[in-house]
Amino acid sequence: MSLYPPDLEDTDADDVTYLDEPPPGRTRVLVGAALGPLIVGYLSVAAVLALVVAVATRSHFSTPGVLAAAMPGWLGAFQVPLTLGGDHLGALPLLPTLGMVLLVGRTAANAADRLLAESTRDVVPVLVTVGVSHATLGVVFAGVTSTASVVPSLLVPGLLSAASAALGLARRGYFGDVLGRLDVLVVRGLRAGLLGLVALLGIGALLLVVGLGASFTTATALFNAGAPGLGNGLGMFLLSAAYLPNGVIGGVAFVTGPGIGIGTFSAAPLHFGGGPLPAVPLLAALPESGAGWWPVLVLLPLGVGALVGWVLRDACEDPIARLRTVGGAAVVVSAGCVLLALGAGGRLANGPFNPLTMHPWSLGLAVLLCVALPAATVAWWTGPRLELAPSRGLLDDAIEAEAAAEESAEDPVDEEPETVEDSIDEPEAEPAEEGPEPDDEPDGDSNPHGSDPEVTT
């Protein structure tokens, strides 16, 4: 006796389709998206601090001390201004922040995939959960350690984590329905602006590499003098690596005109002012004196603007519409540079190196001009143009009317128009009814007397 139902007895095992596993619970996925980056981020900061303390000379390693120090370290990774020993520290490294952005964005995108999200509305709970969880932990760490104010600890981690989650979701295409509702020119301008921002950051990175290469001897001397021993050297290396993105933003500020300032030191293409600098090998990329050829570097951001214009040259046939798209792209580049410069600079305790600034507002204005002007020029002259019909005047209408009158006068009249009476056809006469045709020879029976028709005289 078979234990299978009758309709499955003869079914091949390979033809049986098993249902997919049900998706995980919504609450469990959201909790994972909230706690995952918090735990991983905090443990990562603690691990780096433990490594530095363990290899540093004349240091006492303590697990509770490392875990306690990781709390303000986590806040600093989210660019929350700190107060350590009475000194205010706002110029925080951007490399840990970049790591947190990537971690949060990837976690949010994976959570949306597990929830089988299909539109922007489906990923809103993920954004809210991630932002609220990071804001809550920021307030808790600020209250426990008393190293940061409550309001920045609430707003900065919450907004930065929500923006990071939005970036991660955008990479997976979860905002396609929102972008589909926007004008095509707006989307083109946004993409061109992101391209211009990446190009500017590439120029800043190139300038930093060239500066470090030109002053490699100075950087090595600072490294050996400021960090003797393996442990101290590792700490100095990690510190310089953490501030590398800040150096890239400084290169952008220098090449676009506003320049960089550390305390009394300032360096810009049109100005140079000396001053003391911290003994950090990364700062060896800064110049020791001014040079007359520095203004030539302004051609590099102008080239970025020309690149943006070339990308948008075929955005629309209407040149005015292309100019609007160029303006949107320039605003995106400028806003991105302002935000990055605000994060890269800040207070450096209360000593002679305070503050570290990239002049964010002047940088935004300079980037806006350097991108918008060449981009508008290239997009205007290299793109297609609308072909407009020539305008007509009263003289053209009079000439055409006179020509039409002459043509009508020269054409001869071949036939006169028919009258109404001629156009009416007369009815044709109906043929008369024909009678029977007479016989050629009369029949004999036609004589009523029946006699020979002879005349007697």
Image (cartoon, rainbow, N blue to C red):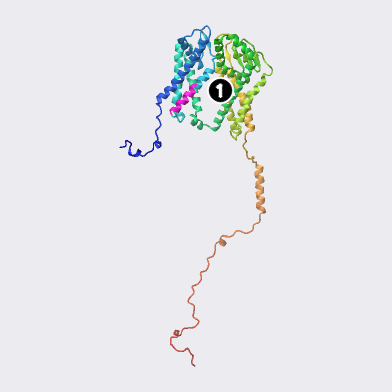
Instruction: Tell me the crowding category of disc 1: few under 14, some 14 to 19, or many 20 or more residues within 10 angstroms, Cα based.
Output: some
**Which x, y percent locates residue 179?**
51, 30
Q: Position of residue 381 (x, y in %)?
A: 64, 32
- The answer to if 110 sits in the magenta stretch is yes
- Looking at the image, can residue 277 be seen? no
**Residue, far bottom:** 457
- In this orientation, which residue lies closer to the viewer: 33 or 267? 33
The mark tally for this picture is 1
At label 1, the amino acid type is Gly
Name above or below for residue 23 compared with residue 452. Answer: above
Q: Quadrant of residue 368?
A: top right
Give the dominant element type of the magenta stretch: helix, strand or loop: helix
Q: Position of residue 425 (x, y in %)?
A: 54, 63
Q: Position of residue 363 (x, y in %)?
A: 59, 20
Q: Nearer the viewer, residue 163 or 49?
A: 49
Tell which of 213 and 339 is nearer to you.
213
Residue named by callout 1: 336
- Is residue 106 visible in the rendered image? The answer is yes
Which residues lie in the magenta part?
Answer: 103-115
* SS for callout 1: helix
From the viewer's perspective, is residue 405 above or below residue 361?
A: below
